[in-house]
Image: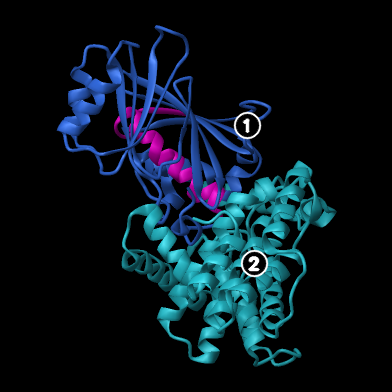
Chain colours: A blue, B cyan
Amino acid sequence: MVSLLDIIGPVMVGPSSSHTAGACRIGLLARGLVGGTFDRAHIELHGSFARTGEGHGTDKAIIGGLLGFRPDDDRLRTALDIAEKEGLTFSFEKTTISDDAHPNTVRITLDRAHRHHSLIGESIGAGRIRITEIDGYPTEINGSHHTIVLVAEDITGSIARIATLLADDGVNIATLRLSRQQRGGDAFMVIEVDEAPGEQVRDDLRKLPWVRWTHRLDKVSA
Amino acid sequence: MYRALADAIRDAEAQGKTLSQVALETESADQARPISEIRDALRRALIVMRGAVEQGVVGDLKSASGLVGGDAAKLMASSNGPLSNTLFRDVLARALAVQEVNAAMGVIVAAPTAGGAGVLPAVLTGIATARGIGEDALVSALATAGLIGAVVAERASLSGAEGGCQAETGAAAGMAAGAATEMLGGTPSQVGHAVALAQQATLGLICDPLGGLVELPCVFRNATGAAIAMAAIEMALAGVTFAIPADEVIDVMGEIGREMDVRYRETAGGGLAATPTGRRLARARLVQIKRSDA
């Protein structure tokens, strides 16, 4: 659903809503995959991101987002220097992600301590974004809600257990999508919630023995 | 939000409301937020827009390449042209101003995008200043502009990489034309005609920035986009109608965007970017960026 405030906004550092602000938002959202700032990041740029990204500061914006800077933060201009000074490792590669990928697509692969995760994000115009894949699972997340992502063994009653757990922690579910690659295979859940879930929610989810991993992805747009 | 401008116009007319009212009510229901909160967010956008206009008309900004900058001030100081010292000239200068700020990595409101960010503040604040129109009316106008932009996002695209410049400065011209038409007392149906009149004038407009950067021709396309919006407002308020409804003009814009060769969609592979001078300037520009990063 398109919001007026997506169209009249964001307030941002120039020069490009898709190549700068949208790129920053994909970085911000990806940050949640490793629960903070990366030790090592590999960023693959596709299409127009690859061809014109440098001049638009797409590289700076993605790294800035990964550092937790928002699109209107003027530290975006110097994000690469800041990351280097902090001793973080990052690399860029120009690539073709797939023939039918959106023109502004990026794959971000992050390492932080023992964690290793990746996502594919698209900047679809006016600063709006769409995450289409997390760790190989197809998904669709637009960053307009706080989102809980989890992979669990496909056991009977898993959704009911999770819904109850969230309700007990006072979290209201806006949408819930479930997919799995095969029957009895791992289930991939994307749960959009109204309020930012606390640490408690994540800890409680991780205590469930059949939950392989879970992430909290912050809301990054109106 | 609405997916068809015709539906919003029908609802507004049936309820005796303005399009900004129905847009705010719909947004409030969609997002479960009170209207006052949405108006406050739009008011904050307006403050940033005004700030960018003020910063840009001073004329001391340069983009990293020096390809653009200082032209807004030039226009404000000139008395040579047929439009000198008119509202129309002010609107053109304001559009240049905001884009010059954007190219210098300053803070702007992407409305609908950064590449098209000059048109809406130029037209709305230019007219409001000349006519003594207050802040509340400007905030309402931004809601109307948001409604129009949302319809374009749903039916076509707001991305130069998907739809060319018609989806950025073209959409901005449609948004500004409709919003200002309402601000000046136009009916919902006149707003629809203003959108159609502006959007039809930018059909097929390619996105061909030198080196892929939001500088040239983007800065100037914002000024000419604002001029198209002004023409559409003038005609719509005079009762001029456009026989093809705005929604259909927007659909066609989306269709043209999908058919548009990738060279013309923000890749710097065609158009002005691929001219001999365009290539030469872009090369010099990228060398300069690398140097300033070092």
The total of numbered circles placed on residues is 2
Residue A206 position by quadrant: top left
Task: Indicate the position of residue A135 as horizontal and vertical percent values.
Answer: 44, 21
Subunit that carries the residue with mark 1: A
Q: Residue at x 20, y 30 (%)?
A: A201
Q: Percent from the top left, x then y, of residue A152?
A: 32, 15
Disc 1 target residue: A101
Position of residue A122 in the picture relative to residue A70 (left or right): right
Q: Amino acid at mark 2?
A: Gly
Amino acid type at circle 1 is Ala
Position above or below: B66 against B291? below
- Badge 1 crowding class, 10 Å Cα cut-off, few under 14, some 14 to 19, many 20 or more, is some
Residue at the spot of label 2 = B174
**In x, y percent, where is residue A210?**
26, 12
Asked which secondary structure carries label 2, the reply is helix
Q: Relative to the observer, which residue lies in front, B186 or B260?
A: B186
- Dominant SS type (magenta): helix
* The residue stretch that appears in magenta: A16-42
Q: Give the structural element (helix, strand or loop) at label 1.
A: loop
Image-based side of B222 in relation to B259, left or right: left
> In this view of the protein, can residue B52 be seen by the observer?
no
Q: Is residue B260 above or below residue A177?
A: below
In this orientation, which residue lies closer to the viewer: B127 or A159?
A159
Q: Is residue A32 magenta?
A: yes
Q: CA distance from mark 2 to mark 1?
A: 29 Å
Q: Nearer the viewer, residue B89 or B123?
A: B123
Mark 2, Cα crowd under 10 Å, few <14 / some 14-19 / many 20+, is many
Residue at the far top in the pictured view = A184
